[in-house]
Image (spheres, rainbow, N blue to C red):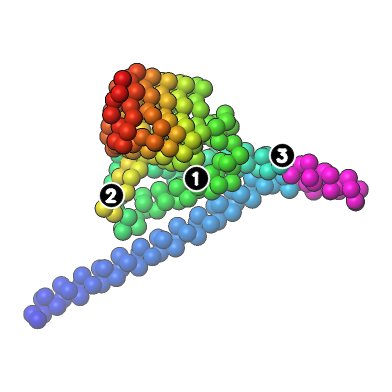
Amino acid sequence: MPLMHQQDVSAALRSASRAHSGARGRIAWMIASFGVVQSIVCGLSALPIVLLWQALLGVLPDGLPTLLAISVLALPSYGVFAIVLMAISAVTLRLLGWQTPRDSQMRLADFDWPVLNWARSMAALHVVRVLAGSLYRASPVWTTYLRWSGARIGRRGYVASLALSDYNLLEFGDDVVIGADVHLSGHTVEEGMVKTAGVRLGRGVTIGLGSVIDIGVQIGDGCQVGALSLVPKGATLQPGAVYVGRPVRRVR
């Protein structure tokens, strides 16, 4: 092998080794920082409840009154924890910039910072979905949390699904109804690439339960999407129409 070719190969191997080492370091930092941030977020969310229980246990006598107080206040205490968690988590994500970049393409295998920030944001949203979503979905509290997290939602929005993500890429008009188990997000993964684009639903749009709304979709005012339908990437649905099917087709 010529000397120059050997040097080129060695340089390429060293460059690849440095790239792999850098990726491992970024992944380790992502995991560690996510763990620390979520521990702080959950700890601060639980703090009001801990202080309340500490005060109550200090004044209640031992025995049946304390057991009754614990039984009665358990669920309300968790409800308060969930609301505080939603607020603190949303503010934290905005301060740290852990959001989905708009109209971008990111190679998963590179493990660069945009991908890792997106992964941390998705994981943080999942924590809130698990700990608070089941309690408050389809309520004004859940809609408010989505707004806190960057979603632009008009008045009287109704979101009964926990399968939404990339909130900062979502824009809903007034009186939008999202049925249970609707999958709606601003990202998709194709051939190892994370691709992102916004999703816009006009005023009075209804999405039937179990439907899938892909990235880059634009749905006009008053449009209805039937249950278990698929609206493919980049589709535009006309105002006032009804669509059903996988993929959707206009039926009226």
Q: Residue at x 53, y 40 (%)?
A: 90
- Marks 3 & 1, CB-CB < 8 Å contact: no
Q: Main secondary structure of the magenta part?
A: helix
Q: Position of residue 1 (x, y in %)?
A: 9, 81
Is 138 placed above or below 130 here? above
Residue 222 colored magenta? no
Amino acid type of disc 2? Answer: Glu
Q: Residues within 10 Å of mark 2 (few under 14, many from 20)?
A: few
Please count the marks in the image.
3
Which residue in the structure is indicated by mark 1?
Answer: 125
Q: Which residues are magenta?
A: 51-74
Q: Residue at x 55, y 36 (%)?
A: 137
Which residue is at the far left? 2
Which residue in the structure is indicated by mark 3?
Answer: 76
Q: Is residue 195 visible?
A: yes
Q: Tag 1 or tag 3, which sits nearer the N-term? A: 3
Q: Nearer the viewer, residue 46 or 156?
A: 156
**SS type, badge 2:** strand
Q: Which mark is residue 190?
A: 2
Amino acid type of disc 3? Answer: Pro
Q: Tag 3 or tag 2, which sits nearer the N-term? A: 3
Q: Position of residue 215 (x, y in %)?
A: 33, 38
Label 3 to label 1: alpha-carbon separation: 23 Å
Residue 174 lies left or right of residue 39; in this view the side is left
Label 2 to label 3: alpha-carbon separation: 43 Å
Q: Position of residue 28 (x, y in %)?
A: 44, 63
Q: Residue at x 46, y 30 (%)?
A: 178
Nearest-to-viewer mark from 3 and 1: 3
Q: Residues within 10 Å of mark 3 (few under 14, many from 20)?
A: few
Label 2 to label 1: alpha-carbon separation: 22 Å
**SS type, badge 3:** helix
Residue 64 colored magenta? yes
